[in-house]
Amino acid sequence: GFVACMPFLGYIDKTLQLSRLLTPLVNVPTCSVGLTYQFCNVYTFERPGGWYIIGNTPINIFNPSDHNKPNLINPGDEVKFYEIQKNEYRKFYEK
């Protein structure tokens, strides 16, 4: 991706494809899940962005302090997203 370790997850289902936002968002939180055209991504840093934000993952996919495996998602990996409830989301932060 264009930001350190921000994966471009490609070729999503056509029913999910959206164009870019006409006006970019000033601040997209870390771990936000975005869509544009045939791509999906997960924002690894808080930053501006022009993609539609459809959710947020409780799993941080980039950890620069883990020198052995800083990236949770690597080229060639298959990624699946699924809906979880707020109480499940919060459990990730309690660990």
Image (spheres, rainbow, N blue to C red):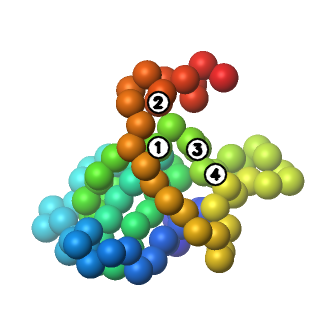
What residue do we see at 48% from left, 27% from top? Answer: 88
What residue do we see at 69% from left, 57% from top? Answer: 71
Secondary structure state at the residue bearing disc 1: loop
| 53 w.r.t. 84: above or below | below
Secondary structure state at the residue bearing disc 2: helix
Inter-mark Cα distance, 1 to 4: 12 Å
Callout 2, which amino acid?
A: Tyr
How many C-alpha atoms fall within 10 Å of the one at disc 4: few (<14), some, or many (≥20)? Answer: many
Residue 59's spot in the image, x, y percent?
A: 56, 42
- Whether label 3 touches label 4, CB < 8 Å: yes
Q: Mark 1 points at which residue?
A: 57
Secondary structure state at the residue bearing disc 4: loop
Inter-mark Cα distance, 1 to 2: 8 Å
| 22 w.r.t. 53: above or below | below
Callout 3, which amino acid?
A: Asn
Secondary structure state at the residue bearing disc 3: loop
> Which-is-in-front pick, marks 3 and 2?
2
In the displayed orientation, state which residue is furthest to the right.
Answer: 68
Q: Mark 3 points at which residue?
A: 60
Q: Name the residue under label 2.
A: 89
Q: Mark 4 points at which residue?
A: 62
- Whether label 1 touches label 4, CB < 8 Å: no
| 52 w.r.t. 31: above or below | below
Residue 79's spot in the image, x, y percent?
A: 54, 63
- Whether label 1 touches label 2, CB < 8 Å: no
